[in-house]
């Protein structure tokens, strides 16, 4: 089946540093990937849509200069949290849709998530 | 996207069927019903989806009412590992950039 790998699964960093999270589709190509953020006891909140070869589309209220997204290939999207602060501590989850639609209409495969803690 | 309404939580006994309801009274004709679940501290997992016919796969069954205003996800023999938050989402199937928006979902607790 379709697998999406996220790395790292957890990361601790100091305030002011930048952290990069990778999202890879392992056995399928994904022209579009999505990045979500989830705070404790809350639902997933869509941050941005990552498009291969073009600029990401950010949801309202999400700072594009703070959350840099790069989708350089059909199997890799990266999210960089720049100048991280404690309030950026969260669970970041990516998802991808099989470009050939083999999984079914609009079915997304999610990564296991990356837990970021900013000290 | 059509809005969905789910109870906040429910529980069931291990080995029994878990029936998770979802209301989507404003669903449009071209919108599908999707179910995902999220086990604690993991990414969401796709379960099943359907348009108007009932669907079944190795994980669950999806029963959609004839007027499509509500649906029920059925886990036929719930196990402790089925304890999770279950999300019912209504969305069109087409569109390369179509996105899934998650509500609060229903927390299912399976008790021994």
Image (spheres, coloured by chain):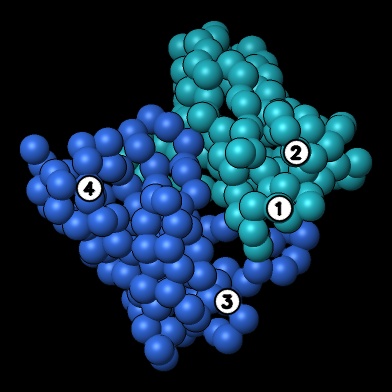
Chain colours: A cyan, B blue
Q: Tell me which chain the residue with mark 2 is part of.
A: A
Specify the subunit that label 4 lies on.
B
Task: Confirm or deny contact between disc 3 and disc 2 (CB under 8 A).
Answer: no
- Residue in the image at 61% along x and 55% along y: A107
- Observer-nearest residue: A65 or B107? B107
Please give the label number shown on residue A102: 1
Q: On what subunit does the disc labeled 1 rest?
A: A
Confirm or deny contact between disc 2 and disc 4 (CB under 8 A): no
Dots 1 and 2 on the same chain: yes
Report in which chain the residue with disc 3 lies: B
Outermost residue toward the bottom in this view: B67
Q: Are marks 1 and 4 in contact (CB under 8 Å)?
A: no
Give the answer, above or below, for where B27 lies relative to B16: below
> Comparing marks 3 and 4, which lies closer to the viewer?
4
Q: CA distance from mark 3 to mark 2?
A: 25 Å
Which residue, given by chain and number where applicable, does mark 2 sit on?
A28
């Amino acid at each position: 089946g379709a697998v999406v790998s996220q790395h790292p699964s957890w990361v601790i960093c100091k305030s002011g540093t930048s952290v990069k999270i990778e999202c890879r589709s392992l056995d399928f190509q994904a022209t579009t990937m999505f990045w979500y953020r989830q705070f404790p006891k809350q639902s997933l909140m869509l941050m941005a849509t990552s498009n291969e070869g073009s600029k990401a589309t950010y949801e309202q209220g999400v700072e594009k200069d703070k959350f840099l997204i790069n989708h350089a290939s059909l199997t890799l999207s990266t999210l960089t949290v720049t100048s991280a602060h404690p309030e950026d501590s969260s669970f970041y989850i990516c998802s991808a849709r099989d470009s050939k639609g083999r999984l079914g209409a609009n079915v997304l495969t999610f990564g296991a998530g990356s837990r970021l803690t900013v000290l | 996207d059509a809005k969905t309404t789910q109870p906040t939580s429910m529980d069931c006994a291990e080995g029994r069927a878990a029936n998770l309801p979802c209301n989507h009274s404003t669903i449009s004709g071209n919108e599908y019903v999707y179910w995902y679940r999220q086990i604690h501290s993991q990414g969401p997992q796709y379960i099943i989806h359907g348009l108007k016919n009932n669907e079944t796969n190795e994980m669950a069954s999806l029963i959609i009412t004839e007027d499509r205003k509500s649906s029920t996800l059925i886990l036929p023999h719930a196990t402790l590992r089925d304890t999770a938050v279950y999300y019912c989402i209504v969305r069109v199937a087409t569109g390369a950039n179509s996105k899934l928006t998650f509500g609060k979902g229903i927390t299912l607790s399976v008790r021994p």
